[in-house]
Image (cartoon, rainbow, N blue to C red):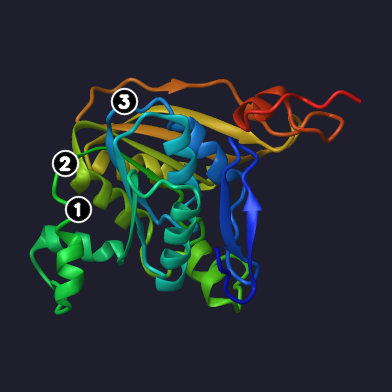
Amino acid sequence: MDLKEDERIDDLEYNNLKIIQNKNGFCFGIDSVLISDFAKEVKNNSIGVDLGVGTGIISILLTAKTKISKIIGVEIQKEVAEMARRSVELNNMQNKIEIINLNIKEIINKTKKENLSDNLENNKIIEKLPREEFDFVVTNPPYKKLETGKINNNEYKYISRHEVTADLADFIEVSRYLLKDKGTLYMVHRPERLVDIVELMRKNKIEPKKIRLVYSKVDKEPALVLIKGIKNARPFLKIDKPLVIYDTNGEYTDEIYDIYGKNKKIN
């Protein structure tokens, strides 16, 4: 496959899967790997949406780890969406994964019947995302509020890390719109936003059902939170045991090796 300037093909270290990344853009981290594993409980033949699909890693890994029927990845950045499409083709997953270039706010505008796009092509794309038709939504949204954290001068990285084009409330509202009754939302985010996440999920009738905190090391503060919510479910929250990424020797823990589908290295 031909690569564009500054692009490279990286090994996902799982089932010989590959992904195209731009060294000047936002490259995936372990959070994407963890949320794809967290969501692998989705039922066979499910249809879902990956909101803010980025490079396509979550959709690609989830397709490899499950027997879902189809997943639609939504990405606002045109160049990133096009790169994700080529990664899908690189892994021969075109029959399972569709990447579309769209701002998720246009789906929200549709729900409110206001500010519909004048772009007919965009409106055709929106029709691929009908109300209450999807079994699950998975998302790794931007973590940082505007005007917080370090501002990156690289536009691609800035949009990927900060709530520039859509915020947490937008991602959860769109999830409510897309999900069937009892459909499931899987999200990875920062622990400091957990209260906001739970509040917004309940506001949108998505009941938090499972939370798992992720630690870089056992003696550190949590770095990530994985959260599962079910639309129109009854209240009952399960807190899973912590997930620790590195052991005391700086090596991946057994569970992380399992997630990558690899055996732990023996020195």
Query: x and y percent of residue 171 in the render?
Result: 33, 53
Hey, what amino acid is under mark 2? Glu
Dot 3 or dot 1, earlier in sequence: 3
Residue 133: mark in rendering: 2
Q: Which residue is mark 3?
A: 44
Dot 2 or dot 3, earlier in sequence: 3
Q: CA distance from mark 1 to mark 2?
A: 8 Å
Q: CA distance from mark 2 to mark 3?
A: 16 Å
Depth-wise, is mark 3 or mark 1 nearer the camera? 3
Which image quadrant is residue 243 in?
A: top right
The residue furthest left is 113
Question: At 10% across and 69% down in the image, what residue appears?
Answer: 114
Q: Quadrant of the N terminus?
A: bottom right
User: Do tag 1 and tag 2 residues touch (Cβ < 8 Å)?
Assistant: yes
**Depth check: 195 or 156 in front?**
156
Hey, what amino acid is under mark 1? Leu
Q: Which residue is mark 1?
A: 129
**Disc 3 residue crowd, few under 14, some 14–19, many 20+, Cα 10 Å:** few
Question: At 13% across and 62% down in the image, what residue appears?
Answer: 110
Query: x and y percent of residue 6 in the render?
Result: 64, 73
Query: x and y percent of residue 132 in the render?
Result: 15, 42
Depth-wise, is mark 2 or mark 3 nearer the camera? 3
Q: Quadrant of the C terminus?
A: top right
